[in-house]
Amino acid sequence: MTEPDVVVIGGGPSGCFAALKLAGKGLKVTLYEEHDEIGVPSHCPGHLSIMGLKRLGLYPLPERIVENTFNSATFFSPNCTPFSVRLATPVTCAVNRVLFDKYLAEQAQNAGAQIYLNSRVEKLAFGQHEFEVRVKQEGQSETIRAKMVIDAEGISSRLAREMGLPGPDRKMLAIGVEAEVENMEDRNLDSVDVYFGSEYAPGFYGWLIPIREGKAKVGLAVKVGNPKIFLEKLMKKHPAASEKLRNARITRVAVHPITLGGPTSPSYSDRFLAVGDAASHVKSTTGGGVILGMTCAAIAAQISSEAVEKMDFSSEFLSSYQKRVNNAIGFDAETMVRMRKTLNAISDERLDRLIRMCARLGLEKTLKNVNDIDFQGQSLLRALRNPRMLTIVSYFLFEYLARNP
C-alpha cells in the first residue's frame, strides 16, 4: 500500500467530502470506515437545504438520491396551534442518506481516494516524521504512516479526545430517534411538520417528513427519557401527527445522540484536524450537521493541502483551520447555540404564546423568501430589517437575557 499524504477516519458525508476534496487537489488520501458498507447504519432523516448543497457544488443530485423537495413547513406549538410558512421556491430536500453517502464515496474514489471498509482505526501515534495509524482490518492490525489525519469519526470523538482535543459538550447532548414509515395519510407532500412541546419531545422537537407513495420519515429528540417511547406517543396521541400516522407502520428505526453545543475549540493539533460531528459542526437549533460538516471538511482539505505543500504539520500552522472555520460558520454557530439555549428555557406556555404571536403578526410573509436555513445567524440579520421579525427576536432576546443575566 502506498503511504498516503492524509488519512481520513470515517466514511460519513464529512469524511467522504474531505477525501473528495483532498484527492481533487492531487493528494494521496486513504479513508478508513469501520462498517462494512458506506452509509449503513443510517441514523439521519437526510433533510438538507438545497442552497447548502448548491454552495458545496453538489446540487442537483442524481434523481435516485432525492426523495422529495419542500417549499412549506407547519410548526405546531405545544397546544397544537399551527403556524405555516410557504416559501417562494423549494428550499429543502429529503435525500436517501445511504445513497447520498455512497454517492460521495464514489465521487471520492473517482477522484483517486482509496477507501477501505471494515477498517477501524485503533490508535494514533507520532512517528519521527509522520503519524503512525494503527488500523484493524478483518481481524488483523497493521500500521500505516501518513503525514496527517482528518478525523471524521462522528460524535464519539474518541481519537480527537485521545489527541487532547475537547469532545462535544455532554451537557448539550440530545438523544434522537428517526424512523421510516409507510401507510401515512397525507396528500400535502411538499410540506414538513415540526412538533414542539415537552409532552412529546422534551428539550427538542419532533418532525414529519413526507416522501412519496405513503412513506415518510418521522422522528424526534429528547433531553430526558426514552426517545422511542416519546415517538410512539407522538405517532398515536399527538392531535396533528396522529391524524396522519394512525395507520402508519414503522419499517426502520434508529437511535442516536445529537451534539447541540456548537463547534469545539480547538479542533486541531499537530498533524490532526477534526471535522463533522467529531468537532460538533452541527446546527444547535435543528441538530442537522451534514452541510456544516461538509463545509468544514472542505476547509480541512484546503488546510491539509497547504500543510503538505509547505511540509509544515505543526499545531501552529494548522491553527489557521480553526480561524477559517470560525470565519465560515462561527457567527451563525454562536447565534444558533444562543437560540437553542433560549428554546430549552422557554416553557410550553410561553412557546404557545410565541407561535401565536408569529401567526398574529403575519410572520409567514416575512419568511416566504428565506432560502438559506444553514447559516441562520446571517439569515436572521437579513430578516431583522422587517419590523415583524424584530418583534419576535426581541421576545427571544428578553427570554435569553432573563435566564442568562
Image (cartoon, rainbow, N blue to C red):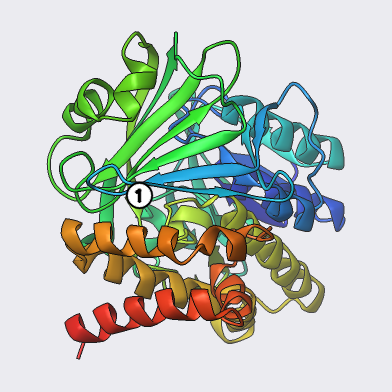
Q: Position of residue 350 (x, y in %)?
A: 21, 64
Screen quadrant of the C terminus: bottom left
User: Label 1 amino acid?
Assistant: Ile
Q: Position of residue 149 (x, y in %)?
A: 58, 59
Outermost residue to the bottom:
405
Screen quadrant of the N terminus: top right
Residue topped by disc 1 = 258
Q: Position of residue 393 (x, y in %)?
A: 42, 77
Residue placed at 20% from the left, 68% from the top? Answer: 345
Residue 177, relative to residue 139: is it above or below? Answer: below
Image side of residue 321 versus residue 356, left or right: right
Q: Is 182 in front, or is 347? A: 347
Residue placed at 22% from the left, 23% from the top? Answer: 232
Q: Tell me the crowding category of disc 1: few under 14, some 14 to 19, or many 20 or more residues within 10 angstroms, Cα based.
A: many
Decide if residue 116 is in sight here.
yes
Q: Position of residue 95 (x, y in %)?
A: 63, 32
Residue 32, relative to residue 24: is it above or below? Answer: above
